[in-house]
Image (cartoon, rainbow, N blue to C red):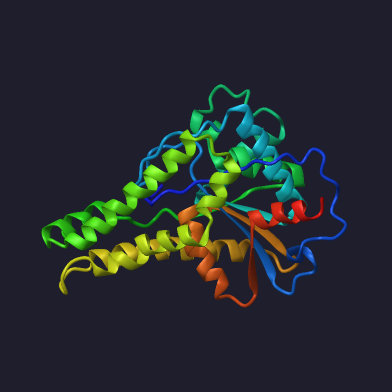
Amino acid sequence: MTLKILWAFAAALSLANCSTPTEKPKSQQAPQTKQALVIGTFHYNNPGADVAKTKNFDIMGSAAQDQLEEISEKIKDFAPDRVFVEWPYDEQSELDSLYQLYLEDRYFSNDSLSNFYLKNEIFQLAFRTAKKIGLPKVTAIDYNNTEFPFDSVMTVVATQKQKILEKEFSEGIQQFTQVFDEKIESGSSLLELTYYLNTEEMRQLSNRFHTQTPLLVGDQTNFIGPYLAAEWHKRNLYMWSLAQKATQKNDQRIVLLLGASHIATIKDFIDQNKDWGTVELEELFNFQDQNH
């Protein structure tokens, strides 16, 4: 996986005694455009591949597992036709094999699977949701043939003595890491973390980090910053392209379960497309609250 700023995902709130809604949310009422439920998440298995390093969240704990059940139930109510995930698109067959193990209830009993496969958000949330819906597959759309030369960017910033940019990069990462760690330490739920990282403020921060601030790096003969931004846009454009191509004519609703930094960028692409609209996870939960 390429480097990125990191983000997080979350869930809570018991639905055990909730009554069934008498009408569907606006997003489910015969939409004129196709609807994409955009869910930005952190990597539950926390492989340490992101630019910002944060504390681990106990995704296997009972509280998190209960919250994953709640989230997957809400997504099931949304009734998506397809679920797209951050897995290499050219390794779909491997993902299909893992999903088949999951469907056969042989997933968690398979001793050959590492923590990555047991804790990753694809397997903890996407597989869980797709199985409940009855989907035959979970679709991979990640495109890994790009670069994210953040170390090179920071080297140029230091060499050119661009102190303001250096401070913006380093303090932005430090601030996010500190806030995210504090939320975990204070006991924030999976849903609370998700809402936090899918706010407009956090998405704007991510896009600034990935595609705006890098454009100012170096002098007029150096393009490492724009190159980083272009590579980031390329990866996300390819992902969104793959999702659209895999969406059939009669499909009305899809789920994009990706790292929150990817969602921040891809949502901008979707917002510019008149044939598509977006739905937030928080909307699904809020609709349920309003009908109690």
Residue 210 figure quarter: bottom left
Whether residue 30 is visible to the viewer of this picture, yes or no, is yes
Residue 158: give x, y in percent of width and height: 15, 56
Q: Residue at x 35, y 49 (%)?
A: 175
Residue 201: give x, y in percent of width and height: 47, 61
Above-or-below relation of 57 to 132 = above
289 with respect to 215 (left or right): right
In front of the other: 198 or 110: 198
Q: Residue at x 41, y 59 (%)?
A: 206
In front of the other: 116 or 50: 50
Residue 204 figure quarter: bottom left
Above-or-below relation of 103 to 150 = above
37 with respect to 115 (left or right): right
Above-or-below relation of 122 to 282 = above
Whether residue 259 is visible to the viewer of this picture, yes or no, is no
Q: Residue at x 18, y 68 (%)?
A: 222
- Furthest-bottom residue in view? 274
User: Total number of numbered labels?
Assistant: 0
105 with respect to 122 (left or right): right
Residue 143: give x, y in percent of width and height: 46, 56
